[in-house]
Image (cartoon, coloured by chain):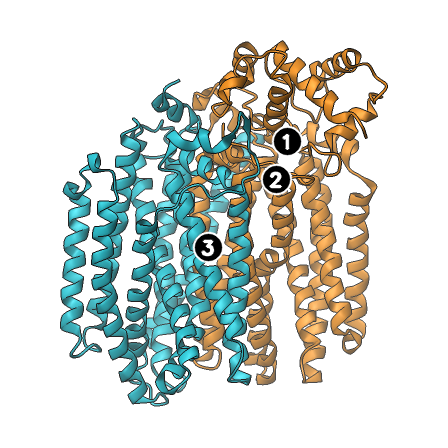
Chain colours: A cyan, B orange
Amino acid sequence: MDIATLLKTMQDPMGIPFYPVVFQFLMVLTFALHIMFVNFTLGASFFALYGHIKGTGYWKQLSYSMARAVPVNVSMAMLLGVAPLLFVQVIYDPFWYASNLLSAAWVIGFILFMMIAYGFSYVFYLGRKKKSDGYLFFGAVSFGLFLLSGVVMHVLGYQLLQPEKWLGWFVRGGSVDASGMTLHSFQISRFAHFLVPSIAMGGIFMMLYAWYFRDRADMDKKYIEWMSTKGGQLAFAFTAIQALVGFWWLLSLPMEFNFFTNPFFLTATLLGIGLLALLYMAQKEPMKYTIPAAAGAFVTIFAMSYSREALRMTYLGKLGYSMFNYKMNMDLGSTALFISTFLMGLVIISYLLAVAYRSGRISGEYTATPIMERWGKISIGLLLAWIVVVAGLGIITTVKNYL
Amino acid sequence: MYPIWEVPSLTPGIVLALIATFHILPSHLSTSAMWFNVYVETKAYRENRPELLEFIKKYSLMILIFSYVFGSLSGVGIWYAATVASPRGISGLIHNYVWGWATEWVFFIIEVTGIFIYYYTLGKVDRKTHLKIGWIFAIAAWTTMIVIVGILAFMLSPGRWTATGRFFDGFFNQTYWPQLLMRTGLMFSIAATYAIVIATRLKNEEVRRFVTRSASVWGIAGLTIGGLLFFFYQKTLPESARTLISLLSTPGLKAGMLGSLGLMILYFIFAGMRPLAVRLVPAILAVFVLFTGIWSIERTREMIRKPYVIPEYMYSNQIIAKDIPSKKVAAETSIINEKGILNIYPFTPQGLRSLNEANMQEAGRLIALIECSSCHALNRKGLRPLPQMIKRLGIDANTPRQEGISTIDGILSGLGGYPYMPPFVGTDAEKKALAAYLYSISQGI
């Protein structure tokens, strides 16, 4: 059987319930959000550690601020990681599953690494409250394991691009190796392309942190300003380094891909250059440029994520696979359920974030304005309406099928 | 079909079960805890008892760290474990229920942002707003149950889905409502059990008394409703599942379900009568007693799905058992019987595609990995170990090879007759290779 036919037969025979391009879009969008928080986590975790080791002045204070931010960022990264994990299994199931199974023990290891890293990041943060020294061990192990988790995900994402090698990885000397103990393929330039932006995004995160607390009376103004400036410098320097890493990675791609002419890649590159220019301008007054810089960084990440997807399509297209040909068993009912829930979710999540934003900006107690109050009521009303509609649908289905 | 992961002694299924079992503790807390929280918070404001907020603060922190740190991670862990244990099984579910999971994910975001904001804004926003956040969290958390129970129910009894292939026909099947209502009842007793743990750590005795007494009422009510609905749920199970309960349910599992129910009711009565007498260690032990009960229910639910991973569609070894015409899906059994499993399986080493005396052993091992290893360990010690099972057939070192192989071959031919076993699929030569392999691993024990 040739590889294109093989890959086609490995697709799930159930097909997919809606157009593949929609799943692809959702996958890329949620991946971009996910990887942004992954970058924040690694960046914050790194600065928490670095500041702790430096141990003096603002760096020490920064270590504390960043350590505090790590658990929240991990939570967000995980939360947002669930969606691309789901969607990749919808349109790239043959690749994702094969890659996972070939390194299955590491897949389970990933969960353990994350649990320990997460737990230790809390110990690192809470422990130092009581005692200023020590606890370096927890911070260092936590950072190390976050990094190792990144390595595992990188390998899974890279192995899946190489179906022609799967059989060779699975079979050793004529018999199968079902231990799942090996990570088979690692590309250093691709991994660096994920690692360097973590420091740059860590810088952006510092800018955001400083910007958010800029008017709080109980915060040290000088420290906040220092954090914003330092964050801006780091973001600029590491975005510049990232541009170089980008070239290195581009050169390491198979030449026949001609990937440098890919429109998605070109768009992402232009946006990256734009971001670099923006960060350069931001050096004088970083506080003022915080929101444009953060927004610019996200747009660049989103374009990079699309470019990563375009690269995946190129790799797999060479083998005759296209997720656009996925068999479809249209299910409009469940599609409508998701879309309406998603829109409703936006209203509710925005309300929650608005409360958090407004209350965090002041040091006393926040009292909701009438609009906020109504927004809260609407949010609860929407949730109740959702339950009524779904339960109604359930009752109708039950009556129709069983009574 | 995919590469296989063999976990020595255990099976990938048990790795999945271990993670899923752990996940019960934080996930059930997350769906129920905020209901108790908003109840206490409302009391605190209405009756002007600010001291009750000490409980809210501690209980919320536990939800945040335990449910949304370890709960989220073990939840993702279930996905990964299911991926490596049964990729085609999880794929089959996802390709039917992707929008269900995506919908649940939206509520999950509301929950996570909700709990962080609820915890960090206590005392920093006005009371009404804080309560609103609590309500949003509580409702959204329960909504995730509305969604996930549909998928769990589908995995137990796909209902009319086998005929129509439609999302909601599989979702709202005959076991949906009993499961949803039973789990809803039980979740209040779970919130109560955890609340008592937190209550033992409170400094203010009056608050401690109030929380423990309220929790006792919630606990008894939840267990009574959940317990009664459990019998309703059993009644709605498909015939095959009920047969399997009588065949497979061990005394341990039955004792786990009924014993923990009885113990928990006694515990809640005691806590209601002498709230200050409950200490931390017994309160934590109560969590484990409750956990034993839930674990027994979940294990039984997993067991009565056999021989399928998705009933009426896919066997536990991930081979498609039946046609689903509405989805244009054809069973794989006959084509595998005709062409051979080693020819259909994409990851067969080149040398094993055609069988001969020399490669028989290796081919047999690969067939065992494909068709047996998701439930049976291939080594002597472990879960449902094949060597021991062969030995139980009376085959040992004294049995001549040919005789042993032909006995095993006979058993393999009749596998489909057992209500909980998938049939052997493949050619006669492959069956013989598997029999030869099974004979060889049973020697010397």
Q: Which amino acid does label 1 sit on?
A: Ser
- Single out the mark in the foreground, 3 or 2: 3
Q: Nearer the viewer, residue B99 or B159?
A: B99
Task: In the rendered structure, find residue B12 and report the number of the disc placed on it.
Answer: 2
* Chain that bears disc 2: B
Which residue: 66% across, 39% down? B8
Task: In the rendered structure, find residue B373 and report the number of the disc placed on it.
Answer: 1
Task: In the rendered structure, find residue A261 and report the number of the disc placed on it.
Answer: none
Q: Which amino acid does label 3 sit on?
A: Ser
Which residue: 69% across, 36% down? B303
Q: Which of A299 and A110 is in front in this view?
A: A110
* Chain that bears disc 3: A
Q: Quadrant of residue B373?
A: top right
Q: Which amino acid does label 2 sit on?
A: Pro
x, y (%) of residue A392?
48, 44
Q: Is residue B332 something that shows in the picture?
A: no
Q: Pointer 3: what residue?
A: A149
